Amino acid sequence: MKPVSATLQGIGVAVPPGRLDQDAATALAQARCCTDERERAWLRRVYRHSGIRKRGSVLIGPEHDTAGFERFYPVPATTEERGPTTATRIQRYVEEAAPLGERACRAALEQAQAKVASITHLVMVSCTGMVSPGLDAQLIQRLGLSPDIGRLNLGFMGCHGALNGLRAAEGLLQASSEGRVLLCCVELCSLHFQYGWDMQKVIANGLFADGAGAVVLDGIETGDRQGWRLVETRSRLAEDSSEAMTWRVGNHGFEMTLSSEVPKRIRGALRPWVEQWLAEHDLRLGDVRHWAIHPGGPEILRAARQALALPEQASHASEKILAEHGNMSSPTVLFVLERMRRAGASGPCVVLGFGPGLSFEAALLR
């Protein structure tokens, strides 16, 4: 039997209506993380050089009202306070994540011109909330999907989760050539804001945001519904890097560590891995027309460009998404692809993501 080619027929994205500009985010963070002017000055530099202008948060009200954020994260009376418990944060996730995911899914379905009844499988990706029944069950009800639909939840994979989701969707289509998969990534990173003075956590506070992305994939490639074809996905776990980036459950939210070694590791290991992979498809770096690089932050983008000897414009789409939305973890690279698709980008396109491990994930689109 001939292998089925998974095709990205529609991509949809969604952000919370409440937006937070970087100046307001800086002030909120200083009040909850800093104890003296030296710390406040360092935090200001981190936020100023983050590459972010605005970001979405389910805690921010219309007209950029920060009152919801301030209620959820009250200013600490002592340096020992760490904000809401993990249980409180997860409860807010349960309330907020599904509506955001639904909006992204409906946008993807509309672009794909796909009826809800045609969806045979749902792949759900999230690393900022854990509950069962989960978002898959909520989306089945909210979208009107079949109760018999095949479901798969991918959790706690971090910023490259969408690429793992694409791999899972491709596998489902190989098993069911007449299938159609809806992939949905939802992250509410703002629910894991960390109190206190810890430089790695301050950096994470300054980068992450809320958002959702969705993709409709099937094995059909005809007429007006022709889309990017998923040629292959590839994964690599970097050696001796297990502590370079971590994402763990704490008593007061999920806690991230981001080592300053991450860009160095990317510069050292990314190019030979990507070159060998592309060569298997008779491609060289110069044959790739577009690069959808997950914007983990300015240093991550710079390291990827340097490693692959790419021109600055190769990461422009990623930089714009980072500036307009922040790092939304797993859905962020779908925002990059959605922007490229609207601009008429064509293949070959390489999608890259980096996550805890330190792990590299890639997808080749045609």
Image (tube, rainbow, N blue to C red):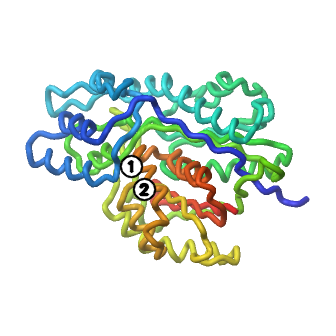
Could you say whether the residue bearing mark 1 is in a helix, strand or loop? helix
Residue placed under numbered mark 1 in the picture: 323
Residue at point 61% right, 78% down?
Answer: 284
Percent from the top left, x then y, of residue 76? 18, 28
Amino acid bearing label 2: Glu
* Vertical arrangement, residue 105 with respect to residue 4, above or below: above
Seen in the picture, residue 364 relative to 155 is either above or below; the reply is: below
The one nearer the camera, 335 or 170, is: 335
Horizontal side of residue 275 vs 129, given as left or right: right
Which x, y percent locates residue 100?
A: 53, 30
Residue 68, how many percent across, how many down? 33, 22
Residue at the disc numbered 2 = 319
Q: Amino acid at mark 1?
A: Ala
Q: Around disc 1, counting alpha carbons within 10 Å, would you say few (fewer than 14), some (14 to 19), or many (20 or more)?
A: many
Query: Going 66% across and 64% down the picture, which residue do you hit?
Result: 347
Cα separation, mark 1 vs mark 2, equals: 6 Å
State whether residue 252 appears in this view.
Answer: yes
Q: Please give the label number shown on residue 271.
A: none
Q: Residue at x 31, y 61 (%)?
A: 260
Query: In the rendered image, which quarter contains the N terminus?
Result: bottom right
Q: Count the numbered circles shown.
A: 2
The reply to whether dot 1 and dot 2 touch (C-beta < 8 Å) is yes
Secondary element at image label 2: helix
Picture quarter containing residue 70? top left
Which of the two residues, 298 or 236, is positioned nearer the viewer here?
298
Residue drawn at point x = 28 percent, y = 29 percent = 83
Does residue 152 appear in the picture of this structure? no
Could you tell me residue 52's position as x and y percent? 34, 48
Left or right of 98? Residue 365 is right
**In the image, farthest residue toward the left:** 37
